[in-house]
Image (cartoon, rainbow, N blue to C red):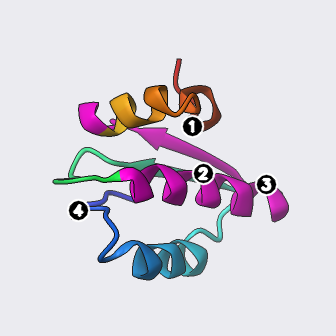
Amino acid sequence: MLFRSPINVSNVVALLAQGKDRFTASEVTVDLAGVTEVDSTAVSLLLEWRREAARNGRRIEFLNLPANLTSLAKLYGVIELLGQA
């Protein structure tokens, strides 16, 4: 799944619901190359998607994290939880 939108406080609840509806395969890849803007809620969203996947026995992988999202995840000390090194 390729995201082509911002991930911020104004749309994070809708994106959370979309993820629960769309992520039904045993392995899900989320390409974030099209993300245009992020705030700290983006980190929370990805972590919740990962928790949801784990609860349901699924694997989720995040590709092409934007630099600003990577910076936030490093700042919060959770970059490894997003599957990034």
Of residues 14 and 4, which is closer to you in this image?
14
Q: Are marks 1 and 2 in contact (CB under 8 Å)?
A: yes
Which secondary structure, mark 2? helix
Q: Where is residue 29 shown, x and y percent of the image?
A: 50, 49
> What amino acid does circle 1 point to?
Leu
Residue drawn at the location 47% of the way across and 49% of the way down: 43
Q: Which residue is mark 1?
A: 82
Q: Which residues are magenta?
A: 40-68
Q: Which residue is mark 3?
A: 54
Res 6 label: 4
Furthest toward the left, the residue is: 36
The residue that disc 2 covers is: 47
Left/right placement of residue 30 relative to residue 56 reads left
Q: Residue at the spot x=26%, y=36% of the render?
A: 68
Q: Which amino acid, by three-letter code, is at mark 3?
A: Ala
What element does badge 1 sit on? helix
